Amino acid sequence: MNKNGVSEEDVLADLAKIKLLDTPYERVLSSMCTYPHPIAASVHQDFLETNMGDPGLFKGTTILEERVINLLGKLLHKPDACGYLSTGGTESNIQAIRAMKNCSISKKPNVVLPSSAHFSFEKTGNLTGVEMRRARLDPDLRVNIDSVKNLIDENTIGLVGIAGTTEFGQIDDIQQLSLIAEENDLFLHVDAAFGGFVIPFLEKHYSYDFEVEGVSSITIDPHKMGLSTIPSGGLLFRDKSLLESLSVHTPYLTVKTQSSLTGTRSGAAVAATYAVMMHLGMDGYKKVVDNCMDMTRYLVSGAKERGFSTVIDPVMNIVCLKMDSPVELQKRLLLEYGWRVSVTHNPQSLRLVVMPHLNKDIISEFLDDLASLA
C-alpha cells in the first residue's frame, strides 16, 4: 500500500483491466462452476458483512441457513437432515471423514473409496491421518464392489461413494455400498458435490441420497449446478450426533460450540443460495438440467459426426472424448483458439463439462475448432 491511497476511479480501472485476464466462461468447458443466477448475485451483495461463524450476531441470516439446509434435505429425501453450508466440496468431504474418525475407536482408521474420488480426499487423509484406500473401477468407471469388499478390514471406519464423478460424471452403485456399510456397521459418505443438483432432475431415477438407508452424510455444492455464488457448499448428515461429533467449544462467541471447519463463514453465500433455490424451485432447476442435457446430447452427436467417440455414454452433463493425444490437444485448443478444456487420467480423454453458460452455437464452434486440430 502507498501512503495516501489511490482514487476509487483508478482502482476500479485497474481492476477492470486485470479482470480481462480471466477466461470468460463462454470459452470454458472444463469447470463445474458457472455464472451465478442474477438473483443470487444481487442478494449476495446485500449480505456481505454477515458472518455465520458468529450466528448470534446475525440471527436473520442464521434462519436463512436453517432454511437452506431444510431445502437441501428435501432435495435429498430427508427434510430433517442436519448440517451447514461450507465453502465447497473439499471442506465438506474433509468434515465427513473427520466425523467418521471422531465416531470411531480405531487407532489406525482407514476409509475405502473409489479411485475416481476427488483429490480433496488426498488432503483429507493428510489432515486427519486416516488412510485412504482406493478401490478399482469397473468397465463403466463406477467403483468395483468386489474391490471395495476386499479392502475392508477391522480398522475400516467408513466408505465413500461418488454421485457424479469429477472426471467422468459417473454414479457409483450407492445401494450396493449401503448394503456393505450396513453389514459391516460402517459410515457411508456420498460425494454429490456436482451431482446433487443434477441427478434429481434427470429423466432416469438414481437412488443415491438419504433415500438409501445406509447413507450417513452427503456433500452437495450449490455454487455448481445450484447456480449460487462462490463459496457455497453443503454438508448434510442423517443423524445429529454425527454433526455434533465435529463441535468444539467457542467461549468468546455468541454460541457455545461450532461444528464447521472454518470459523468465519460467508452469510452472503447463505442468502444467495436461499434466494436462488426459492426462486427457481424444482421446476426451474429441471429446466436448467434439461437444457444442459440437451446441449450434452448435441455435443455428443456433433462429436460423432466429426469422427469422435465417447469413453462412456454420458450419465449427466459431462462428456469425455477418446483422443490419441489429449494433453497435446488441450494445449493447442488453448493456444490457438482460447478454449479451456481438461484431461482425464485413467483412461486419458478430453473432458468437457456442459454448464449453463454454454449454448449450441458455442458448442458448434468448439467442435469445429477441435476437428481442425485432431
Image (cartoon, rainbow, N blue to C red):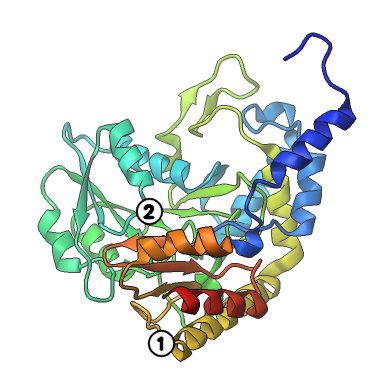
Is 307 on the left-hand or right-hand side of 172?
right
- Identify the residue at horizontal 64%, vertical 80% (top origin): 360
User: Which one is nearer the viewer's eye here, 114 or 107?
Assistant: 114
User: Which one is nearer the viewer's eye here, 160 or 186?
Assistant: 160
Which amino acid, by three-letter code, is at mark 1? Gly
Which amino acid, by three-letter code, is at mark 2? Ser
Give the secondary structure at mark 1: loop
Q: Is residue 42 above or below residue 298?
A: above
Q: Name, please, the residue furthest toward the bottom.
A: 305
Q: Is residue 130 above or below residue 81?
A: above
Q: Is residue 88 above or below residue 261?
A: below
- Identify the residue at horizontal 34%, vertical 42% (top origin): 97
Query: Are the residues flagged by discs 1 and 2 in contact, CB closer than 8 Å?
Result: no
User: Where does label 1 land, which residue?
Assistant: 307
Tell me the quarter of the image containing the N terminus.
top right
User: Which one is nearer the viewer's eye here, 246 or 2?
Assistant: 2
Mark carried by residue 216:
2
Provide residue 31's location: percent of width, then percent of height: 53, 58
Is 20 on the left-hand or right-hand side of 317?
right
